[in-house]
Image (tube, grey):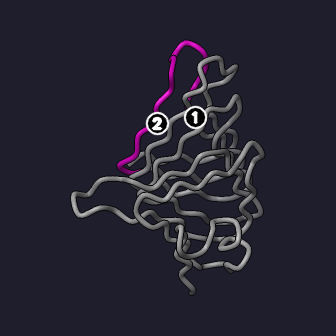
């Protein structure tokens, strides 16, 4: 199991993902911001994506954009602020599993038609010590599940 350090002097996120295999870890250095752009980033490998913490235990690693986990992948996101300003689902999990630990998920798009942060279909989703923040609670739900299992620890 390999570990890829993602940061300004090491791997960029996309290249690290391409080189990674099932069971590998992509570790974001302190103060790293990964910009996934406007398209949905597809993850179909079983990986752990983890952010380093400061000595004061602050979260300083960001992923901006949308991710889709598919193909029976088992993905763990840990110690990351996942944010976007998009009018779409931020994390979709289809026939796969997603574990969140110490993750903040925030969509700051003011006029979004949907406020779904996580959409799961035939999936397992586990979230511990994580925060889901929506701009407005009257425009939709934060989580949507279909034939899926959700565990909020």
Q: Residue furthest left?
A: 56
Q: Which mark lies nearer to you, 1 or 2?
A: 2
Closer-to-camera residue (16/146): 16
- Asked if residue 41 lies left or right of residue 135, the reply is right
Q: Is residue 131 magenta?
A: yes
Q: Position of residue 16 (x, y in %)?
A: 65, 74
In percent of the image, x 44 and y 44: which residue is there?
104
In percent of the image, x 36 and y 53: which residue is there?
59
Q: Quadrant of the N terminus?
A: bottom right
Label located before the other in sequence (1 or 2):
2
Residue range (magenta): 128-143
- The residue tagged 1 is 143
Q: Is residue 88 magenta?
A: no
Q: Residues within 10 Å of mark 2 (few under 14, many from 20)?
A: some
Q: Position of residue 23 (x, y in %)?
A: 60, 79
Q: CA distance from mark 1 to mark 2?
A: 9 Å
Return the mark for residue 92. Answer: none
Q: Position of residue 127 (x, y in %)?
A: 45, 50
Tell me if label 1 and label 2 are in contact, CB under 8 Å. Answer: yes
- Asked if residue 51 lies left or right of residue 121, the reply is left
Secondary structure, mark 1, is: strand
Secondary structure, mark 2, is: strand
Closer-to-camera residue (134/16): 16
In percent of the image, x 56 and y 78: which residue is there?
4
Return the mark for residue 132. Answer: 2
Q: Quadrant of residue 2?
A: bottom right
Q: Position of residue 61 (x, y in %)?
A: 45, 56
Say above or below: 118 vs 77.
above
Q: Residue furthest bottom?
A: 1
In percent of the image, x 61 and y 20: which residue is there?
140
Q: Residues within 10 Å of mark 1 (few under 14, many from 20)?
A: some
Say above or below: 110 vs 105.
above
């Amino acid at each position: 199991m390999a570990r890829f350090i993602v940061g300004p002097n090491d791997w960029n996120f996309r290249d690290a993902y391409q080189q990674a295999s099932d069971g590998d870890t992509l570790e974001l250095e302190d103060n790293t911001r990964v910009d996934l752009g406007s398209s949905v980033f597809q993850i179909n490998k079983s990986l752990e994506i983890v952010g380093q913490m400061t000595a004061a235990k602050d979260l300083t690693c960001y992923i901006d954009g949308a991710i889709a986990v598919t193909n029976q992948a088992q993905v763990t996101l840990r110690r990351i602020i996942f944010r976007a300003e998009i009018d779409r689902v931020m994390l979709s999990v289809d026939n796969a599993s997603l574990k969140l630990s110490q993750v903040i998920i925030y969509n700051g798009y003011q006029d979004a038609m949907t406020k779904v942060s996580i959409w799961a279909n035939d999936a397992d989703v586990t979230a511990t010590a994580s925060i889901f923040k929506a701009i407005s609670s009257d425009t939709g739900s934060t989580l949507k599940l279909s034939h899926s299992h959700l565990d909020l620890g």
